[in-house]
Image (tube, rainbow, N blue to C red):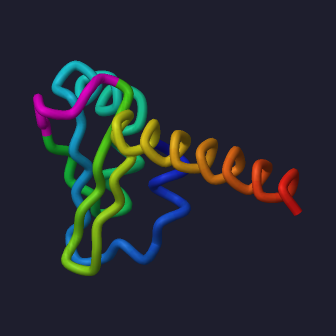
Amino acid sequence: MRELLHAEPALSGRPRLWLHPADLTLVKGHLGAEFEAAGWQLQPDDTISRGGCRATSSSGELDATLESRWESITQQVRRRHKDGQNEEQA
């Protein structure tokens, strides 16, 4: 969460961080002051799995839910596997 806060300056215009309600409580307790100082609003979203989050603002969106991260990893593995097969055939 701290990396997101400091690494995503492109998210401007009242950025919001959406978290599972149980995670929201933890983040508020540990990083709430940092997010508040940076102008972020923390929002609950019970459709997000624990451990994931989604950041939104008027300038864009960043999906860091577990599901989207898992999909990204799966695509990378498939791409590497496919590239490896192509190299073997060449």
**Farthest top residue?**
22
Instruction: Report the side of 30 relative to 55 (left or right).
Output: right
Residue 59 point in image, percent of width and height = 27, 80
Q: Main secondary structure of the magenta part?
A: loop
Location of residue 43 (image quadrant): top left
Asked if 28 appears above or below 63 in the picture, the reply is above
Asked if 3 appears above or below 31 in the picture, the reply is below
Residue 46 point in image, percent of width and height = 11, 29
Q: Residue at x 19, y 77 (%)?
A: 58
Residue 31 point in image, percent of width and height = 41, 37
- Residue span colored magenta: 44-50
Asked if residue 49 is among those painted magenta in the image, a careful observer would answer: yes
Instruction: Report the side of 42 relative to 28 (left or right).
Output: left
Q: Residue at x 26, y 27 (%)?
A: 49
Asked if 58 appears above or below 88 in the picture, the reply is below
**Farthest front residue?**
89
